[in-house]
Image (cartoon, helix red, strand yellow):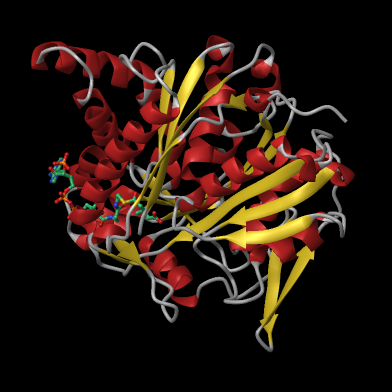
């Protein structure tokens, strides 16, 4: 078995999933007596995904990954590592990943575990999986990394408008068809109380305005470390170097603020930077935010859903171009890293199904949304054609009972 080219390793296939209930945020704004423009313009958010009683972190993850097997993009016996990044785990001890392992029918020889570091957990999983693929431990096998979350805050709080739910599934391999990942990355870790969720709470606690500063300072720190990691090649302007910038998106306006922070570190006078920012944001950031505007914060999955949208809608213009990605997890750990779309990636991206996620969702009203959040994922029977292959049937004696439909091997 030959050693993989370190800069050749990356994402071979991407699966995505959103629950099929959606709350238009103008409805929530009206109910909370908040001007709609504060949400649609001030935060840039239009709708948030809401989970029905039969969906939880496990089912979202399985429903994101199952199509990859059904479409024949990867075989079960090729997977030697399964990592699930989430901050909304279903048990304090039994990891969500082992339910997913069973429901997807993965081999017993597949190393399986869950990772938590707020929204950074999915990125931690992908970058760790890439290093595993590069190492002899992988024995030429592939890794499956899942990022799955249900974002919850206190009803009536200003953070309520930044909830959401969704999942992404990434197959990491030595010969990726979608995105090659450069192993030189920049990290910034720092213990801060910007966002946390005590063990007995379903809703996160947050110091909202402070969390924005923490995010932006982590971007500055991760960028500085990335320049060091690039060993001289990290010097110079970034704006023209990357065809796209993807940021963790708790709400779309955050990506705007992040890009402004990145541009503030570029050379040139203030006027030149302001002009460059407007053009660069419009061409290289805003187009990838469409899914986030309609799903809300999907925590660990946010960055990867943005990548999925970008790859599916725009990959033909991005082949052999470099893109920059920034992941932030409160608490905090952040990473700035880069990748390149290989020749042929547009064809591989065509099957992702990101746009299809937005079709056929059922709008809920505020009363229904409040009832769904109050009861949480307690199990139930989904209607036919609800979009997934797996659901939570019930929770009995603190044990979760999942049911999955048959899907192609
Ligand atoms: P808020 O109280 O709604 O904030 O909370 P605001 O009063 O500052 O208003 C927001 C924006 O709307 C402002 O724009 C206002 O000017 C504007 P900005 O000045 O920032 O550009 N505005 C209006 N615009 C148009 N028409 C109007 C109007 N009124 C005001 N009439 C906050 C916002 C984000 C703080 C809150 O929703 C929150 O706490 N959310 C949760 C925390 C969060 O998302 N933090 C993001 C960074 S941390 C992160 O990303 C990690 C995270 O994903 C968790 C993890 O890692 O696991 C959260």
Residue 363 versus residue 100: which sits nearer the camera? 100
- Which quarter of the figure is the N terminus placed in? top right
Task: Tell me where residue 44 appears, x and y as whole percent.
Answer: 28, 38
Task: Tell me where residue 4 appears, x and y as whole percent.
Answer: 75, 27
Please determine whether, in this image, residue 194 is positioned above or below residue 125: below
Q: 234 left or right of 342?
A: left
Q: Is residue 327 visible?
A: no
Q: Residue at x 44, y 78 (%)?
A: 199
| Quarter-of-image position of residue 243 | top left
Residue 244 versus residue 36: which sits nearer the camera? 244
Q: 34 left or right of 220?
A: left
Q: Residue at x 59, y 18 (%)?
A: 341
Task: Tell me where residue 134 appears, x and y as whole percent.
Answer: 70, 35
Work out which residue is located at the far bottom of the displayed protein and give it: 397
Q: Residue at x 23, y 19 (%)?
A: 266
- Which quarter of the figure is the C terminus placed in? top right
């Amino acid at each position: 078995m030959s050693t993989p080219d370190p800069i050749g390793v990356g994402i071979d296939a991407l699966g995505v999933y959103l629950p099929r209930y959606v709350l238009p945020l103008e409805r929530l704004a009206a109910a909370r007596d908040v001007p709609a423009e504060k949400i649609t313009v001030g935060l840039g958010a239009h709708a948030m995904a809401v989970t029905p009683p039969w969906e939880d972190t496990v089912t979202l993850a399985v429903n994101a990954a199952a199509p990859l097997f059904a479409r024949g993009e990867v075989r079960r016996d090729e997977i030697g590592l399964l990592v699930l990044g989430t901050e909304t785990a279903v048990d304090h001890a039994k990891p969500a990943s082992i339910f997913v392992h069973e429901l997807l029918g993965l081999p017993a020889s597949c190393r399986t575990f869950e990772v938590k570091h707020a929204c950074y957990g999915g990125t931690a999983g992908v970058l760790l999986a890439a290093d595993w693929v590069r190492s002899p431990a992988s024995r030429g096998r592939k890794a499956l990394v899942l990022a799955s979350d249900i974002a919850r805050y206190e009803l009536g709080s200003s953070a309520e408008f930044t909830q959401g739910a969704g999942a992404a599934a990434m197959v990491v391999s030595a010969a990726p068809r979608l995105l090659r990942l450069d192993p030189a990355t920049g990290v910034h870790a720092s213990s801060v109380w910007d966002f946390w969720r005590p063990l007995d709470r379903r809703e996160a606690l947050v110091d909202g305005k402070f969390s924005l500063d923490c995010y932006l300072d982590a971007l500055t720190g991760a960028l500085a470390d990335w320049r060091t990691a690039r060993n001289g090649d990290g010097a110079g302007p970034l704006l023209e170097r990357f065809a796209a910038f993807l940021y963790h998106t708790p709400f779309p306006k955050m990506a705007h603020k992040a890009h402004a922070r990145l541009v503030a570190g570029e050379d040139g006078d203030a006027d030149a930077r302001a002009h460059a920012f407007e053009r660069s944001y419009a061409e290289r950031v805003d187009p990838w935010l469409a899914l986030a505007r309609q799903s809300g914060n999907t925590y660990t999955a946010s960055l990867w859903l943005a990548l999925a949208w970008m790859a599916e809608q725009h990959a033909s213009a991005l082949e052999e171009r470099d893109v920059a990605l920034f992941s932030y997890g409160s608490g905090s750990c952040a990473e700035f890293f880069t990748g390149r779309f290989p020749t042929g990636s547009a064809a591989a991206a065509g099957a992702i199904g990101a746009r299809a996620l937005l079709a056929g969702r059922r709008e809920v009203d505020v009363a229904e949304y409040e009832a769904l959040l109050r009861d949480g994922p307690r199990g139930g029977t989904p209607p036919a054609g609800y979009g997934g292959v797996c659901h939570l049937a019930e929770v009995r004696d603190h044990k979760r009972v999942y049911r999955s439909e048959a899907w192609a091997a």
